[in-house]
Image (spheres, rainbow, N blue to C red):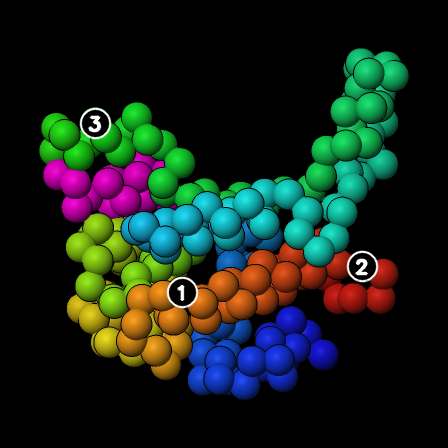
Amino acid sequence: MDSVEKLVARRPELAGAAPSLRKLIASTVVALRSGGSFFVAGNGGSGADSDHICGELLKGFLQKRPLSEAAKNEFAGLFGAEGADVAGKLQGGLRAISLLSHPAFCTAFMNDVDADLIYAQQLWALARPGDVFLGISTGGGSKNVKAALMAAKVIGVKSFLLTGNKHGVCEKYADEVIAVDESETYLIQELHLPLYHAFCAAVEAEMFPTEGEKC
């Protein structure tokens, strides 16, 4: 039973979001395996969720992700015992970028240009065709998420929207919508967390397979 099946068994109210969640997982794995990046952004609580997601991907989540023996040997060869100690603590990470992580840029662009374009500008600068962008908007109407979805389309970035059941304007701009059947913001956010934890677990399992799993 994979992470999405486990999620639906535990939270059957999320069964409707499972097919789109699987598409997000598959697209992200393809992007990461080809050297691409995963980007995510949202506002308020959804912004905190964006940082949370990246926190699970940049380091071990359910697995420890030790470095390869080759990497450990290189650290030890270059830096001796100190290098071996560093290599023993580092973990395999995934190219996950929260677009809230550049406050100096964000405040400058908000002040000098347009606050609604802070995420679109970062995608334009950092993303490449084949990357993946996840926009989180509980009501589906966030202007800065919509602009980022527009930029993603022009760049050639696969885009996903994580939202509720209000059918906001952002749905028209995303390649795929992952929606939960709630309309109150805090209830939507309560259902978003298990969805993105299942996403992180699934991506980790694919990128760092344990013995017997398919790479």
Amino acid carrying label 3: it is Ala
Residue at x-position 52% and y-position 73%? 22
Which label number is shown at residue 36?
Answer: none
Q: Considering depth in this image, is 159 or 190 the residue closer to the camera?
A: 190
In this orientation, which residue lies closer to the viewer: 117 or 131?
117
In percent of the image, x 78 and y 28: which residue is there? Answer: 87
Spot occupied by residue 50 in the image (x, y as percentages of width and height): 43, 50
Establish if 49 lies above or below 72.
below
In this picture, which residue range is highlighted in magenta? Answer: 114-127
Q: Residue at x 21, y 27 (%)?
A: 108
Separation of marks 3 and 1 at Cα, in angstroms = 29 Å
Q: CA distance from mark 3 to mark 2?
A: 44 Å
Residue 44 coordinates in the image, percent (x, y): 32, 50
- Identify which residue is drawn at 76% across, 47% down: 64
Q: Which residue type carries mark 1? A: Gln
Residue hosting label 3: 108
The crowd level at tag 2 (other Cα within 10 Å; few <14, some 14-19, many 20+) is few
- Tell me: residue 185, above or below residue 32: below
In this view, the mark in front (3 or 2): 3
Crowdedness near tag 3: few (<14), some (14–19) or many (≥20) residues, C-alpha within 10 Å: few
Q: Is residue 48 magenta?
A: no
Magenta stretch, main secondary structure class: helix
Q: Mark 1 highlights which residue?
A: 189
Q: Which residue is under mark 2? A: 210
- In which quadrant of the rendered view does residue 35 lie? top right
Q: Quadrant of the C terminus?
A: bottom right
Q: Secondary structure at mark 1?
A: helix
